[in-house]
Image: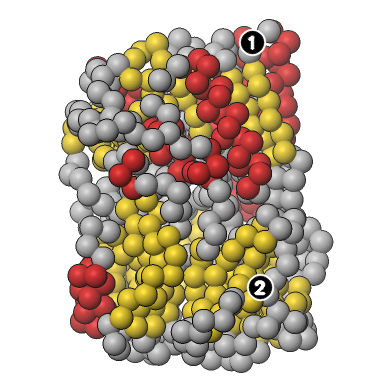
């Protein structure tokens, strides 16, 4: 499935088992009590959006060194200390332009991290020695996007990196020496490969391609052989490789071929024959597997219904979680890093009201040592509960969502912020959300919904969103507002809409096509004109443009449709006060998308505030810009909705 516009920042490094979590049953027509025993403290914007003093803890493969990120000169940098030592941590990086977005250990003596420039998403992969004395940009190419394909854990000094240096639209794979920076081409992209898959030795053995409409799985038995196409499907079906079986002969896949919901299966890549269904769920897609590289066993199967769910299939992993649950009752638990011998773990404990704490767990002794509270300024008791809800769209489709009510307020006739997610082919999840908590702390109810097209609910739910931007997808959002009003929760005169990326588009569509519904609106890096948007997409999206045309609309064949659902072409309908925020270097939603809506409305005399940050891209990454945006947003909404 194509994912284009999510506000979540693109990172070089995947997050390991990040869980969204738990504590309430589904409710249709839920109205919960929000009474508090004492007045709730009002926290500052800085309290919610400050960079944590310590975060992103990881441990070296030998278990001797602990790393984490900490602000220095206003930016997150990497620090290292020896486990069990009383000596202070040593800073090993010196990034001052932007936070380091993600990092990982490479052996016991080096770390790798990603950096882009002003939010352009052209990430470089940088290597730094454990003592910080040897910093090397492994991909020092301007306007080139790079990412790690495989960290080659068993190889001391090399990694696999893909980048689009040769041709902007496609990514080749290189074997890179982290000491010298020397790169050797391992796999050249013929022009249509979207993803590369390595086996457990690091050999590039499989790939997926797209011609814009059809997707294929390519396979080869060894790197010396040419790839052969073994399976081709419409992009509406998917067979996504997860990783090879431990004998490197078969593939674990997440597949919806012949079914509506994705299931975990084992496939023979030589024949594309599905040999075994490992796990499937009747209501949602199943997309992720956890495994132990050390013990060569599957450890867990992960999926999301109304919350993150973990089906543990390994006795040792079950014992690990049993021990952690006993020590951390009342919290969701995520395993974020571990030593190579799996004796030492970095553990996160969190829920919907707190980012929680991070711990170091010694599996041999059973000792649990707190490393840090991620945001100790926020008291968990003052934060609001996020409840899963359901409602029916006007055509009968069941929509799942999350309702957060302000603490200490009677849940009646409240000011409300409707908050559609980005993507749009993504989904909202249960868990701690600083935006939601800040708004609830100001007295707003917040509704997030997984409108049609949101991922995780199966193929049919996804497909009914095709060519429905501004139409039934928007109706699902509108119907959520109507549901809140009928429940008596929302004051119909004090409903605002706020969203980023596709959520920003939905915000603009909301005030364009339902101009009497919203009292205020905040558009954060949102699309306004479908024609100009498609003309400015990043080059590496172009191979998928035909697919995008089928899902959203073709500028030539569907000209009338796209004109009808482009808010920038219908600004005469907009009368709602609007606040727009935009990064000048945004590669996904060009600044012109915001410029044209602002200019048109100002000519008509419609109230519109406009914030542009010259050192940002698709969303505000730097702390000072987050403070500026959320302060302006709370002031803007407060003046109009008067929540207190």
Q: Nearer the observer, disc 2 or disc 1?
A: 2
Q: Work out whether residue 616 can be spotted.
A: yes
Q: Position of residue 12 (x, y in %)?
A: 60, 65
Q: How many marks?
A: 2
Q: Which image quarter is the C terminus in?
A: top left
Height in image: 324 above or below 71?
below
In which image quadrant can residue 402 be found? Answer: top left
Residue in the image at 46% along x and 17% along y: 641
Residue in the image at 34% along x and 47% along y: 380
As helix, strand or loop, the secondary structure at mark 1 comes to loop
Q: Which mark is residue 43?
A: none
Q: Position of residue 254 (x, y in %)?
A: 36, 64
* Disc 2 from disc 1: Cα separation: 50 Å
Q: Which mark is residue 91?
A: 2
Question: In this view of the protein, which residue sits in the foreground, 405 or 403?
Answer: 405
Height in image: 606 above or below 410?
above
Residue in the image at 40% along x and 11% along y: 493
In the rendered structure, the answer to whether residue 634 lies left or right of residue 437 reads right
In the rendered structure, the answer to whether residue 478 lies left or right of residue 85 reads left
Crowding at mark 2 (Cα within 10 Å: few <14, some 14-19, many 20+): some
Residue in the image at 37% along x and 75% along y: 369
Q: Position of residue 298 (x, y in %)?
A: 31, 79
- The residue tagged 1 is 606
Mark 2 or mark 1: name the one nearer the start of the chain.
2
Crowding at mark 1 (Cα within 10 Å: few <14, some 14-19, many 20+): some
Q: Position of residue 247 (x, y in %)?
A: 39, 90
In which image quadrant can residue 374 be found? Answer: bottom left
As helix, strand or loop, the secondary structure at mark 2 comes to strand
In the rendered structure, the answer to whether residue 393 lies left or right of residue 554 reads left
């Amino acid at each position: 499935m194509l994912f284009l516009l999510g506000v979540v920042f693109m990172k070089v490094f995947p997050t390991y088992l990040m869980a969204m979590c738990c504590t309430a049953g589904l409710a249709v027509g839920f109205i919960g009590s929000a009474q508090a025993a004492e007045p709730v403290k009002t926290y500052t914007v800085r309290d919610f959006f400050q960079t944590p003093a310590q975060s992103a803890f990881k441990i070296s493969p030998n278990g001797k060194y602990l790393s984490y990120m900490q602000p220095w000169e206003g930016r997150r940098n990497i620090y290292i200390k020896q486990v069990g030592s009383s000596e202070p941590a040593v800073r090993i990086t010196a990034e001052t332009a932007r936070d380091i977005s993600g990092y990982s250990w490479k052996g016991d003596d080096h770390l790798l991290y990603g950096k882009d420039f002003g939010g352009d998403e052209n990430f470089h992969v940088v290597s730094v020695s454990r003592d910080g004395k040897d910093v090397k940009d492994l991909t020092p190419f301007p306007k080139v996007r790079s990412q790690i394909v495989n960290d080659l854990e068993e190889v001391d000094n090399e990694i696999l990196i893909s980048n689009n240096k040769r041709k902007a639209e496609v990514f080749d794979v290189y074997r890179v020496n982290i000491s010298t920076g020397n790169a050797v081409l391992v796999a050249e992209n013929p022009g249509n490969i979207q993803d590369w898959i390595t086996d457990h030795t690091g050999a590039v053995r499989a790939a997926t391609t797209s011609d814009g409409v059809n997707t294929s799985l390519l396979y080869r038995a060894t790197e010396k052989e040419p790839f052969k196409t073994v399976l081709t499907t419409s992009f509406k079906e998917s067979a996504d490789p997860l990783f090879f079986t431990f004998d490197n002969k078969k593939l674990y896949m997440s597949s919806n071929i012949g079914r509506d919901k994705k299931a975990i299966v084992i496939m023979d890549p030589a024949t594309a024959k599905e040999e075994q269904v490992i796990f499937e769920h009747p209501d949602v897609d199943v997309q992720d597997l956890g495994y132990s590289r050390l013990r060569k066993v599957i450890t867990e199967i992960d999926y999301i219904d109304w919350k993150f769910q973990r089906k543990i299939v390994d006795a040792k992993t079950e014992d690990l979680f049993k021990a952690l649950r006993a020590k951390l009752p009342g919290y969701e638990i995520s395993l974020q890093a571990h030593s190579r011998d799996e004796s030492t773990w970095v553990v996160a404990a969190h829920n919907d009201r707190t980012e929680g704490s991070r711990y170091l767990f010694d599996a041999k002794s059973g000792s649990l040592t707190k490393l840090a509270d991620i945001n100790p300024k926020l008291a968990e008791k003052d934060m609001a509960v996020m409840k899963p809800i359901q409602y029916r769209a006007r055509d009968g489709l069941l929509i799942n969502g999350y309702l957060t009510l302000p603490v200490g307020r009677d849940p009646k006739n409240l000011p409300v912020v409707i908050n559609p997610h980005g993507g749009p082919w993504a989904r909202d999840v249960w868990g701690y959300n600083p935006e939601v908590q800040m708004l609830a702390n100001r007295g707003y109810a917040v509704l997030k919904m997984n409108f049609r097209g949101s991922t995780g609910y199966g193929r049919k739910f996804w497909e009914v969103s095709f060519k429905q931007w501004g139409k039934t997808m928007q109706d699902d959002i509108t119907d959520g507002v109507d549901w809140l009003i009928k429940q008596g929760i929302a004051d119909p005169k004090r409903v605002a809409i706020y969203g980023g990326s596709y959520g920003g588009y939905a915000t603009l569509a909301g005030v364009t096509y339902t101009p009497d519904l919203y009292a205020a609106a905040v558009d954060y890096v949102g699309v306004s004109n479908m024609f100009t948007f498609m003309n400015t997409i990043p080059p590496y999206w172009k191979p998928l443009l035909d697919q995008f045309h089928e899902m959203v609309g073709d500028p030539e064949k569907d000209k009338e449709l796209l004109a009808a659902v482009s808010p920038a072409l219908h600004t005469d309908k907009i009368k709602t006060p609007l606040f727009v925020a935009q990064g000048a270097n945004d590669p996904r939603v060009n600044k012109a998308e915001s410029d044209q809506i602002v200019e048109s409305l100002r000519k008509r005399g419609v109230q519109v505030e406009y914030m542009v940050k010259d050192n940002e891209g698709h969303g505000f990454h730097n702390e000072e810009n987050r403070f500026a945006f959320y302060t302006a947003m709370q002031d803007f909404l407060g003046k109009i909705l008067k929540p207190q």
